Image (cartoon, grey):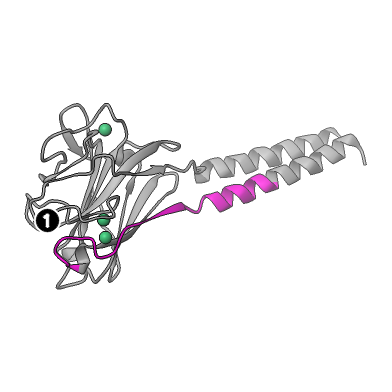
């Protein structure tokens, strides 16, 4: 076997392995965070977080919120919220309202991004970022609903997030009134509040997620083409 032939074969194996890895990793990685069941103050099972699964691909991030009971009509009035803390030195530190939805919920280290969502009438998802004193809503979406879960999907960009970034967050259930607080908080295994207005501060009880670095479909294709071109060129030079 000539050296040129060997290196072309080796390169083909390497490119092939690279493509396999890229194909596998383009499926979203997921992290599951479990909460105590039965820890919410009012006993409504549609307010009781059982777990939250976070995943992302190159463009989007998803929070699948699973509740301890039905969120379908007539218990479709729940609001499912995500508070994100990307930097301990920035964010909304308002008291008791540290979010764009007027809820009596805050993160002591400043909420930097927020997702508000509801399940009734087909549901809705609203992503926000906080930038030096003002909350901005960055588009809107629709949750994927099952009888006991709501998956909130939005772009990484709509929350100011980038691949490789690690952030802290909490997920809250809340009611229909503007001043309602966190009936349940994912990152607190004990009861969060004792009445609807709360207030609630996640404080240091936060979860953590690192945005997976996933190749764009275009870069996978480019990598494959570049590899094949290199092999063809080497074969031609043999
Ligand atoms: Ca719970
Ligand atoms: Ca912050
Ligand atoms: Ca909890």
Residue drawn 86% across and 40% down? 5
Disc 1 residue: CB within 8 Å of ligand 3: no
Q: From the viewer's perspective, tell me whether residue 138 is left or right of residue 95.
A: right
Q: From the viewer's perspective, tell me whether residue 225 is left or right of residue 160.
A: right
Q: From the viewer's perspective, tell me whether residue 224 is left or right of residue 146.
A: right
Span colored in magenta: 16-44
Residue drawn 21% across and 66% down? 46
The C terminus, quarter of image: top right
Observer-nearest residue: 127 or 216? 127
Observer-nearest residue: 130 or 47? 47
Badge 1 crowding class, 10 Å Cα cut-off, few under 14, some 14 to 19, many 20 or more, is: some
Q: Is residue 7 above or below residue 42?
A: above
Q: Is residue 126 magenta?
A: no
Observer-nearest residue: 187 or 162? 187
Q: Percent position (x, y) of residue 3?
A: 89, 35
Q: From the viewer's perspective, tell me whether residue 193 is left or right of residue 61.
A: left
Q: Percent position (x, y) of residue 197?
A: 7, 51
Q: Is residue 12 above or below residue 30?
A: above
> Which residue matches tag 1?
194
- The image quadrant where one finds ligand 2 is top left
Task: Mark yes or no: residue 229 visible.
Answer: yes
Q: Is residue 23 magenta?
A: yes
Residue drawn 29% across and 41% down? 158
Q: Percent position (x, y) of residue 141?
A: 25, 53
Residue drawn 80% across and 43% down? 9
In the rendered image, the residue lying farthest to the front is: 190
The N terminus, quarter of image: top right
């Amino acid at each position: 076997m000539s050296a040129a032939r060997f290196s072309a074969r080796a390169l083909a194996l390497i490119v092939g392995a690279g493509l396999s890895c890229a194909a596998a990793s383009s499926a979203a990685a997921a992290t599951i965070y479990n909460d105590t069941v039965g820890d919410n103050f009012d006993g409504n099972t549609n307010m009781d977080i059982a777990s939250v699964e976070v995943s992302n691909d190159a463009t989007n991030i998803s929070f699948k919120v699973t509740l301890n009971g039905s969120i379908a009509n007539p218990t479709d009035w729940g609001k499912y919220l995500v508070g994100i803390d990307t930097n301990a030195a920035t964010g909304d530190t308002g008291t008791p309202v540290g979010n764009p939805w007027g809820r009596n919920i805050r993160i002591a280290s400043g909420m930097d991004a927020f997702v508000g969502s509801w399940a009734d009438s087909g549901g809705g998802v609203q992503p926000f970022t906080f930038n030096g004193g003002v909350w901005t809503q960055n588009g809107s979406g629709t949750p994927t609903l099952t009888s006991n879960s709501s998956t909130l999907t939005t772009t990484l960009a709509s929350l100011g997030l980038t691949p490789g970034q690690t952030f802290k967050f909490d997920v809250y259930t809340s009611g229909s009134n503007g001043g309602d607080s966190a009936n349940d908080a994912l990152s607190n295994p004990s009861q969060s509040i004792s009445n609807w207005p709360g207030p609630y501060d996640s404080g240091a009880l936060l979860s953590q997620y690192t945005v997976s670095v996933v190749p764009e479909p275009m870069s996978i294709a480019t990598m494959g083409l570049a590899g094949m071109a290199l092999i063809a060129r080497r074969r031609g030079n043999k």
